[in-house]
Each structure stands twice: as C-alpha cells, then as structure tokens.
Amino acid sequence: MCAMDAELTRRQILRGTAAGVAVAMTPGLANAATAALVGEYDVVVVGSGAAGMTAALTAAKRGLSVVVLEKAPTFGGSAARSGAGIWIPNNPVLLAAGVPDTPAKAAQYLAAVVGPDVPAARQQAFLGNGPQMIAFVMANSPLRFRWMEGYSDYYPELPGGLPNGRSIEPDQFDGNLLGAELANLNPAYLATPPGLVVFSADYKWLNLAAVNAKGAAVAAACLARGTAAALAGQKPLTMGQSLAAGLRVGLQQANVPVLLNTPLLDLNVENGAVTGVLVPGGLVRARRGVIVGSGGFEHNAAMRAQYQRQPIGTAWTVGAKENTGDGHRAGQRAGAALDLMDDAWWGPAIPIPGDPYFCLAERTLPGGLIVNQAGKRFVNEAAPYSDVVHTMYDKNPTAPDIPAWLVVDQNYRNKYLFRDTLPLLPLPDSWYTAGAVFKASSIQALGSAIGVPPAALKSTVDRFNGFAWSGVDGDFRRGASAYDHYYTDPLVLPNSCLAPLWAPPFYAFKIVPGDLGTKGGMRTDARARVLRADGTVIPGLYAAGNASAAVMGHSYAGAGSTIGPAMTFGYIAGNDV
C-alpha cells in the first residue's frame, strides 16, 4: 500500500467513509452488512506491542499486505514501558556468547517450570520457533540484542535451569531512525537519568554504585555511552524503548502502516470465521486472518473483579493504561475460550503517587525483610516476584498480608539506590503523605506507625538479624537459590542476601500485589490459532501476547517470560496466516 492509500485508509477509519456514512454498531452484532468497508488487507493486526509488531513484520515479510491497528495515541504498548528482557532459550545471541544451552535442557526446564498447565505442543512451539524469531527480527529490522549475563533463570536448581541465565535484551538503538514517528513512541515506565545510556542488566550494579567498585564502573560506562551518543548526534534508546522503536522501523521498511487512535470495537464474524475488525469508522477486512495482540485486561476493574482474587484493582499495575481487555471480550463474543484469567505477571509493588513502583532489587538487597500485618515474615523476600505475590494471596485470608511491609534501616538507605532516590538522600515527601512509607526511631515505634504489633515486629527483626549474622535463613531459605543473589550486594558476607537491621531510623514501605500485566486470555494452539471451548479452531483468528493465555502457565521461567513468548507466538501467527 502506498503512503497516500495508507493515509486515506487512516482518515476513513477515524472519520467514516468518504461518503460520510455514519456507522452505528452493537458489539457482537455488527458485521459486514452493517458496517462500511474502510480498508482491506491480507492481515489485520490489533495492537502495536511486541506481539503485534512482530506478527505484522513476519506476515509482511512473507509477502502479505498488513495493517496494525492501535488503540493508544502511541505505539509500543507495555513492551515500550518495560525493561525488555526476552527469555528465549537457544537463541543465536546466547549461543554466540557461549551460553551452554541445548534444546534438551530448555525443554526439560520449561516442562519443570510450567508443569501440566500448558500442553506440551505449545511449549515445543515456543522453544522451536523462538530462536528462529530472534534471527528473523535481526535480519528484518535494525534491532540487535545482548545477553543479560548472570541474570539467572528464576528456578536454576530445576533440571535444565541455567544459573547464568537465558535472558537477552535489545542493544542500544538510535531513535533518529524513526524520524517523526519517534514522537509517537510510548514513554518508558521509568525514565533513564539524563546523560546516561542504561541497559536492564546495568541496574543490578547501579543499585550498588555507592558501595561497590564494579557498580561505580558500570555507572561510568553508562555515562560514557551517553556522552558518545550525544557527540554522534544520536537519540539513544535502550530496553523497551529500543525494542518498540526497532520493530517499528522494521515495519516502516516493510511499508506496514500503524494506525494510532484506532480501537478495536469488535471482530467481524461471517459463517463462523473471523473476517475483519470493526473500528469507529467501519470494517477493516482481513482476507487471510486477524491477529490479536491487544495486551491484557489489567486496567479493566470489572474484569479484574470478575476473574481475580481480592483485593485487586487497576491502581497497582504498571501495564499500559489502554490495556482494558478489548481483545479478550471481542474474542469471547466470537466464541473463544479463555484460560488463566485468575493470574497475572505479579510482583510486589509500592503504591506511590502516580505509577506504582514494581520492586525488584529493593526487596532482595541485604538489610530488609517483608512482614505481614501480624509483624511476621511469611515469604522468601528474594524469591521470583510472581511467587511472592502468589504467596501473598494464598496467605492473606488467614494471616493478612495485603498490604505487607518492607522494613529496612538507615544503614540500608545509606548504601543502596531506592527507585530513583540516591543513597543518603531523603525519600520524597509525597511518599510519606500517600502512606506509602513510614519512618520511626525504633522498630517498636515503626510497628505502631504501620499498625503492626510492636513486640511481634521487634521479635521478627531480632530473629532475622540472627539469620543474617549466621548467613542461613532458617525460616525461608533466602539465599539458597542462585536467583536470590542476582540483585544483592556481593560484599555482604556470609550471605549476600542477608544483613541485620540495626541503624535507626527505620523505614516501612507498603507492599501490595502489583503486576506487569495480566497473563490470562484466549486459549490458543501451537499455531497461535484461537480455540473454542470444545477445542475447535475459530477460522481466521489468532492471538499472541497478553491477549492469549500465557505459555508459562501459572509460573515464570526467567526475565523476559512475557515478551519472549509474545514475540514468538506473534511470529508463529504471522507465518501461519
């Protein structure tokens, strides 16, 4: 499609047909007979996140005409906001770096992590197509990737697990390649400090820059990269910004239009087959198929209340705000079965003003512990973040832990970055005003401030301090897994996960069940085709990413278990269609 045709289609979709036909539609009832045709392509992709753009690029490179419809005024979705870790075993970037992975190890590990929740055929489709997808993206876009060395698989002790990890992330990308489209890139969840070029793998060390020589060296390297980029006239992007920008440039090169401000109203179904997408201006017909990559339903309060455990809501998620389950509901109306709707890509979060803060390093660094409302520990604080929240929900009915409290001392605050607050600097006043953090001169006074029995909290901290001195967590085995040590301080001995709390004042951060997005969605097969409850295929309908039920089931294999499968099943769908 030429640029003029693409712009005409955009105007028709947003404003109606050239004849000015007004289209009134009832969701689930609208079809080609009632909606004006405003565009026709081989493939219509819903959503411009990692899943949607990978699917679109794949289909386009197979010679099909493709359009991407995006609800938001920006492209990139949650992927653009993310750290953009990508978990793909045996991919060419890993193998080039000498990572000792094999298909057998990967299959053994994924099966152990996922269990029986996900059919073996889908697991094998992911493992078999993932490496090809990475090679394809590198061959058909400017994107390049780097190994996140040392970022352990989340369960490295399981058969086939790798303590040094399988995760990769996008390399540095020059935003100038996007041209004017750079202004339409969805902003990052956390802004990179000005003048620095920071990769996801750097954050581990930036947290330690005040107390660790390697941390200081990594900070200097980030500054050097930023300086070099500025001198070269570049607009350097990393993490999710790099991933989304690189895929978008690939689509530009393949002449695939991405139409912003174009929400999915419904799927068009004729004789049981999906034949297009209904948008505000009418019908965009798909000759070959529709691929739904519209993200999760994390910002739909009614759906969260319907499917997920309480307390839940939309204020604790860091997913893109446009993710309200549009694809899920349209899929249901077309006959799709849904799976895993009770689950999400959970993680402990601090409900600070604005975006909640998704805690990674902070709950793992030595000198902190998490307690419930009785003032007792209830979990290994350094466990995979999804597991921590699963435990919160499991235990909340009998020993309330929502909210829970991350307790640290001034020694901890003097040494480690907390979100974007440097060591020694005071936390923002707004955090205190919002009740997200409390401070007191003693552990007992802190307990009173947060409504936790003071004596119980003091007893818990004393017991924890004993474990810290010995280096062995006798209650929850914190530090027993290689994963536990990723975000910790290697200078703390004998266990880099554990340090005593002794220096006043003491702080308590409110912890709630946050998430990166929901992980339940349309049931799909190994070819990314959407299935009905009886297992039959809905012709013409595919799904990938968080609009589909996750191939990870109720678990989480490693950093990037969201984006890696999203891109892979987008690739599978693009090839299959």
Image: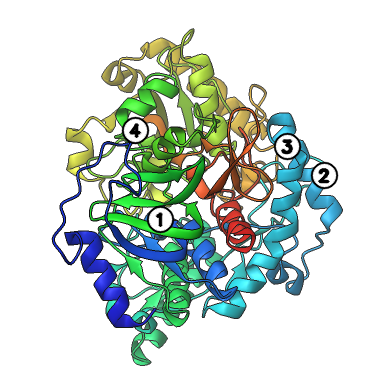
In the rendered image, residue 127, in percent from the top left (x then y), is placed at: 73, 54
Are the residues at dot 1 and dot 3 in contact (C-beta closer than 8 Å)? no
Q: Earlier in the sequence, mark 2 or mark 3?
A: 2
Element type where label 2 sits in the image? helix
Q: Position of residue 380 (x, y in %)?
A: 59, 30
Element under label 4? strand
Q: Mark 4 or mark 2: name the one nearer the start of the chain.
A: 2
Figure check: 496 above or below 144: above
Q: How far across and down, in percent of the image, does residue 404 sit?
A: 41, 24
Residue named by callout 4: 507
Mark closer to the chain start, 1 or 3? 1
Q: Which residue is mark 2?
A: 108
Mark toward the start of the polypeptide (3 vs 4): 3
Label 4 vs label 2: CA separation? 42 Å
Q: Amino acid at mark 3?
A: Pro
Kind of element beneath mark 3: loop
Residues 148 and 332: in front is: 332
Determine whether 137 is above or below 277 in the image: below
In the depicted structure, whether residue 245 falls above or below residue 262? below
Percent x, y of residue 144: 57, 76
The N terminus, quarter of image: bottom left
Residue 402 is left or right of residue 355, and the answer is: right
Q: For marks 1 and 4, give the one nearer the viewer.
A: 1
Q: CA distance from mark 3 to mark 4?
A: 45 Å
**Residue, disc 3:** 119
Which residue corresponds to mark 1?
47
Q: Amino acid at mark 4?
A: Tyr
Q: What's the distance in space between the residues labelled 2 and 1, CA to CA?
A: 33 Å
Dot 1, crowdedness within 10 Å: few (<14), some or many (≥20)?
Answer: many
Amino acid residing under circle 1: Gly
Residue 119 occupies which quadrant of the picture? top right
